[in-house]
Amino acid sequence: MSEVLLVERDGRVAILTINRPDKLNALNGEVRDALVATLDELACDDGVGVVVVTGAGEKAFVAGADIAEFEGRSPFDQRHAMRSPRIFDAMATFGKPVIAMINGFCLGGGCELAMSCDIRVASETARFGQPEINLGLIPGGGGTQRMPRLVGVGQTLRLVLSGEMISAAEARAIGLVELVYAPGELRAETLKLAAKIAAKSPLTLRIAKEAARAAERLPLEDGIAYERDLFCLAFSTEDKAEGVKAFLEKRPAEWKGR
Ligand code: COA
């Protein structure tokens, strides 16, 4: 466990807390490396079914990339800093569900991190935006590509071109977040959802995430064909046999992850 990334367990849920509250949890190289390394470890941990990502303190989820690192940096150094594996892709392609628990400012790379997660749960006090335009920059963590897929090109351009922040209520209304809770309820409600998901078959969760994520890159016809293949792949699992049998026997299924 690194100091900038705290890792806790709550049953089958791993909670990753980005821990730079005095810098509003801005993403520097150390945080990025810790996130990628921790996800790598959790990928092989059968005791973890779901990952929740959040920010330390009351004020911020993540207020963006660490702007201090940008000063004086050459385009070549910046390109090196943006080399693969990137945290955004690591979240999106992680073989288990990842939930963003958004407790405050969710800006720039923070908003891009949240958009890379599978589900976004926000506090009523959270604020969202892509303010890079105010730095003479554009989003560089997938913001111009992932945001249109969630909220459409019009709302994306409104946020990217104006740099303005929106409330959690508005983020919910445009589809940037899925759920919004009062600040005091955020953690309990997010962990309740995470635990519910973590109790499903890890194998089936993986197949479901793979199928839905494919919608981000495939044309409809190809996506439908891919879903059919994945559906039939699910037929090869012991968990499918158990799930169907348990339903017919009117008892809860016992998942094996096989
Ligand atoms: N990178 C580096 N440091 C950051 C940061 C970032 N993205 N966001 C906030 N911080 C730091 C501030 O510099 C300040 O540090 P200091 O106490 O050493 O001076 C500390 O976090 C607290 O932020 P502060 O600006 O004082 O809080 P605020 O409540 O007045 O404003 C924000 C909050 C989010 C509006 C403001 O911090 C902000 O605009 N941050 C940058 C957001 C951004 O542009 N993100 C995209 C980056 S590409």
Image (cartoon, helix red, strand yellow):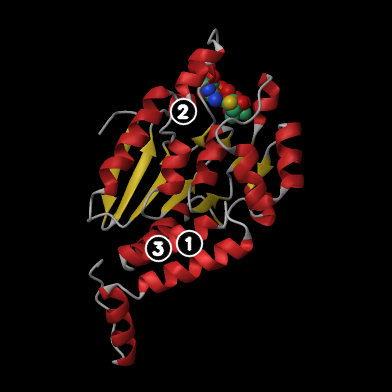
- In the depicted structure, whether residue 105 falls above or below residue 180: above
Quote the CA–CA distance across marks 2 and 3. 30 Å
Nearer to the camera, 9 or 29: 29
Quote the CA–CA distance across marks 1 and 3. 6 Å
Q: Position of residue 11 (x, y in %)?
A: 26, 58
Does residue 7 appear left or right of residue 182 in this picture? Answer: left
Return the residue found at the far bottom. Answer: 249
Residue depicted at 61% across the width and 38% down the height: 143
| Residue that carries the numbered disc 3 in the rendered image | 207
User: Image quadrant of residue 30?
Assistant: top left
| Residue that carries the numbered disc 1 in the rendered image | 211
Q: Secondary structure at mark 1?
A: helix
Image depth: mark 1 or mark 2 in front: 1
| Residue that carries the numbered disc 2 in the rendered image | 27
Q: Secondary structure at mark 3?
A: helix
- Can you say which quadrant of the picture contains the N terminus? top left
Does residue 38 appear left or right of residue 144 in this picture? Answer: left
Q: Are marks 1 and 3 in contact (CB under 8 Å)?
A: yes
Q: Is mark 3 within 8 Å of ligand 1?
A: no
Q: Secondary structure at mark 2?
A: loop
Q: Is mark 2 within 8 Å of ligand 1?
A: yes
Residue type indicated by callout 3: Ile
User: Image quadrant of residue 107?
Assistant: top right
Q: Is residue 60 visible?
A: no
